[in-house]
Structures are given as C-alpha cells and as structure tokens.
C-alpha cells in the first residue's frame, strides 16, 4: 500500500525506499502506544502519516534554486528554448521535461500579468516559499481571508492556464 502511495507522489525508487523505511521505523515506535479506533480507520490514519512524511521528504530534497519568473536568468530561458529546438527531431524524456519547464514559466507569466502584484507575491510566499498564510498576510498588511482567497484564485488560474496550454501543446503534431 505504501508503495502504491509513493507512485501517487511520483517518487523515484530511492525516495520510495527511503520514505517507506522512515514510515516503518516510525510505525514501530508508534504501534506500542497505538489504540485502534474503529470510527477513524487504520488506513486513514496511515494515509495521513504517509502524506505528512512524504511532504517532509519532498521539502528536504529541494535542491534546485527557486526563482520568481521575473528573476529567471536569461541564460536559463534561452537554454530551454535552445534545448527544445535541438530535441524536436527526436523527442525524449529530457525534451519533455524541458518543454514542461518552459511551459510552467509561460503559464506563470500569463497569470502574473492578470493579477495584482501583492496577490502574486502572496501566492509565491505560500506555494513556493512554503510560508504560512498568516505570515504572508502580516508581511503584506492584508487580512488572512484576503490572502487565502487570492491564493486560491491564483492557484485555480495557474491550473486552468496550464491545462489549457498543455492541451494545445499535446494537440500539435510533433
């Protein structure tokens, strides 16, 4: 079951092994005190534990720098365009990853142009910098509700724009 859940999070073999080992070790310690609650269900409890530990692992493994798209180095954007052109002849996983990275930058730029600067900044603080909503609200001098509403709106816009562009990209012949 844990392995199936690892697939949901698109974890590679090494990350899956590490995560499963962490969970089994934690389960060993927790099972001594564990009292089964038939109303809650063991699987639900295990899923919450798994999800929490998977997020922890993914946060620990963040090695690549994160840029606001305005701060994205020109050589990276130009490099993405260049690699896409080279790989158009024979698409492979690297070319697909490069295309998706470029698509993500384009989607961010499109959505950012449609929202206020503070709304975009608050979204970035929460989604990318992993800061609490309350902290973003305090820093930007906005209410918790305004920041949360803006975050949800930008998230929906990014998903919608990304899906639209991805669909049109997949419809184009290679």
Image (cartoon, grey):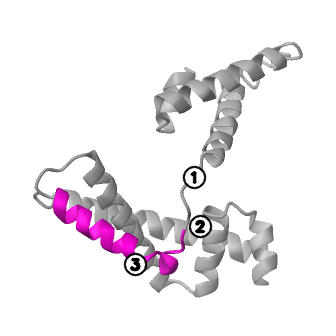
**Mark 2 lies on residue:** 152
- Give the secondary structure at mark 1: loop
Q: Nearer the viewer, residue 158 or 80?
A: 80
Mark sitting earlier along the chain (3/1): 1
Instruction: Point out the residue furthest to the front here.
Output: 75
- Residue 121 quadrant: bottom right
Instruction: Give the magenta part as a residue range.
Output: 67-87
Asked if one can make out residue 106 in the rendered structure from this viewpoint, the answer is no
- Give the secondary structure at mark 3: helix
Compared with 74, 83 (above or below) is: above
- Tag 3 and tag 2, C-beta contact below 8 Å: no
**How many numbered marks does the figure carry?**
3
The residue lying at 69 percent from left, 19 percent from top is 24
Image side of residue 67 versus residue 168, left or right: right
**Mark 1 lies on residue:** 63
The residue lying at 71 percent from left, 31 percent from top is 49
- Give the secondary structure at mark 2: helix
Instruction: Point out the residue furthest to the right here.
Output: 33
**Mark 3 lies on residue:** 74
Q: Could you give the CA–CA distance between mark 1 and mark 2, rounded to whole angstroms?
A: 26 Å
Q: Position of residue 78 (x, y in %)?
A: 31, 74
- Tag 3 and tag 1, C-beta contact below 8 Å: no
Name the front one of labels 1 and 2. 1
Q: Could you give the CA–CA distance between mark 3 and mark 1, rounded to whole angstroms?
A: 20 Å
Pointer 1: residues within 10 angstroms few (<14), some, or many (20+)?
Answer: few
């Amino acid at each position: 079951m844990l392995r199936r859940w690892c697939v949901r999070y698109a974890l590679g073999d090494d990350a899956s092994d590490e995560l499963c080992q962490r969970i089994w070790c934690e389960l060993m310690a927790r099972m001594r005190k564990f009292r089964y609650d038939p109303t809650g269900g063991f699987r639900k409890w295990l899923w919450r534990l798994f999800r929490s530990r998977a997020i922890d692992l993914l946060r620990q493994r963040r090695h690549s720098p994160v840029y606001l798209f305005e701060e994205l180095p020109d050589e990276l954007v130009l490099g993405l365009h260049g690699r896409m052109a080279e790989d158009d002849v024979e698409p492979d996983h690297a070319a697909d990853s490069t295309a998706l990275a470029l698509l993500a930058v384009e989607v961010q730029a499109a959505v950012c142009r449609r929202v206020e600067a503070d709304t975009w900044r608050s979204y970035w603080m929460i989604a990318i910098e992993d800061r609490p909503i309350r902290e973003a609200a305090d820093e930007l001098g906005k209410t918790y509700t305004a920041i949360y509403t803006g975050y949800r709106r930008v998230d929906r816009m990014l998903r919608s724009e990304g899906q639209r562009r991805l669909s049109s990209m997949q419809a184009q012949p290679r």
